[in-house]
Amino acid sequence: MNEHVQTATSTPLFDPLSPEFIRNPYPHYERLRATDPIHLTQHGMYLASRHADITVVLRDKRFGKDYPERIKRRYGPDVMKEPVFRNFALTMLQQDPPDHTRLRGLVAKAFTARRVEDMRPQIQRIVDENLDRIIPQGKMDLIEDFAYRLPVTVICDMLGIPMEHREMFYTGARNSGRILEPVPMTPEEIKQSNAGQAMIKMYFDQLFDIRRKNPGDDLTTQLLHAEEAGDKLSNDELYANIILLFGAGHETTVNLIGNGLLALFRNPDQLALLKAKPELITNAIEEFLRYDSSVQMTGRVTLEDIEDLGGKPIPKGESVLCLLGSANHDPSVYPDHPERLDITRPNVKPLSFGGGIHFCLGAQLARIEAEVAINTLLRRIPDLRLDDAENPEWRPTFVLRGLKRLPASW
Ligand code: HEM
């Protein structure tokens, strides 16, 4: 990539998959907000970095998803022949009303604040049982051994995935989330994603068979009923949305726990404060989401000509990328040192879960999982220390921001 700002510096303004950007995107966001808050990238997409503009894009009906058109502009007219894009297009995440409303309505009840609060004891049990197993070892990888297992177990429970099938999810490679990145996929990456998709589909075929024969009190059974009823959900939509729930339900939450723990251990005063006052955890989670969000960006397309977004006109049919991580550090909303971690910060309302009609369905669930995981870990292993807090290894993706591993001992 060779985008350059016409300033003293010659570093590219937006090079999201470069190791430097992945290590620490925040100085790059600061530069974008200051020099070109609606920046046209070399891939022809508009990049919004200020909180005010991003809030408009997420909430205003003149912006939508229009995924098939957006993706054709990026990859050419035949792109929807690729299973990975065809499938993604059918998820609620990429749909506009009325289909979005219909799909979201089919699962929304499972995610109400009350329903997920009722899951708290089960979440506590999962965390405790995992720690019972790990504590005698004296060391662990906080990502693989700790953060990863909780959200995968919870989403497997919600989807009714039998116990005996789970080991392959616990040990399986985490989905790279490459399809979400603003840098187009190479033909080889598309081929690999198609193959991965085919494997996952084969698994869900098995699960659908099991749940048709033995219906349960789970989301898969619920969606199978909707599909059988005929007009509410097509067979392809069934696959797409179950796969979405599985992916969205764990990758992001693993990273909330991982990024949150890293932030805490890099700020010993904040760590000590939370240990002394565990009741600060609810605000601390909002601050972790703000400080280093596990989702850094989401996109929309202009459904009509926009006269003025942050001072620029944007024609109909253009992609607008919203840098959520940048909005979360915008000093116009967080005037008191946005670059600092402060678990007592007042009025933290991060855009990490998006906004408007696509606001994250699993937000409350993710918050509760992270609350229980982090507080229980600190309580049960008070002398936990990170082996290398200075140079942790980040996963090579920008949109889903998270660590490869985070070794710790006690
Ligand atoms: C820290 C954890 C999480 C973060 C940061 C996160 C972030 C997001 C964001 C930013 C969006 C909106 C994307 C857009 O506007 O285009 C979203 C949507 C969504 N999330 Fe999450 N998410 C998290 C956890 C979860 C969990 C645990 C689940 C489910 C079990 C989940 C399921 C979904 C679904 C189904 C959507 C699509 C909603 C729609 O399009 O109406 N997420 N998430």
Image (cartoon, rainbow, N blue to C red):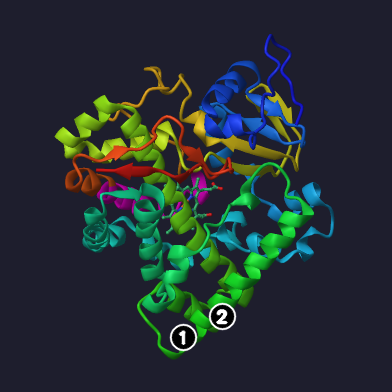
Is 110 situated above or below 3? Answer: below
The reply, left or right, for residue 310 in relation to residue 212 is right
Element at label 1: helix
Instruction: Give the extent of the magenta segment.
Output: 355-373
Query: In front: 174, or 82?
Result: 174
Q: What residue does disc 1 label?
A: 210
Q: What residue does disc 2 label?
A: 205
The reply, left or right, for residue 235 in relation to residue 114 is right
Q: Quadrant of residue 113?
A: bottom left
Query: In front: 382, or 157?
Result: 382
Q: Which class describes the residues within 10 Å of circle 1: few (<14), some (14-19), or many (20+)?
A: some
Q: Residue at x 46, y 19 (%)?
A: 332
Residue 372, horizontal then vertical, whole percent: 25, 50
Residue 202, horizontal then vertical, whole percent: 59, 77
Element at label 2: helix
Q: Earlier in the sequence, mark 2 or mark 1?
A: 2
Q: Is residue 251 visible?
A: yes
Amino acid type assigned to the residue bearing label 1 in the image: Ile
Residue 280, horizontal then vertical, whole percent: 21, 36
The reply, left or right, for residue 46 in relation to residue 177 is right
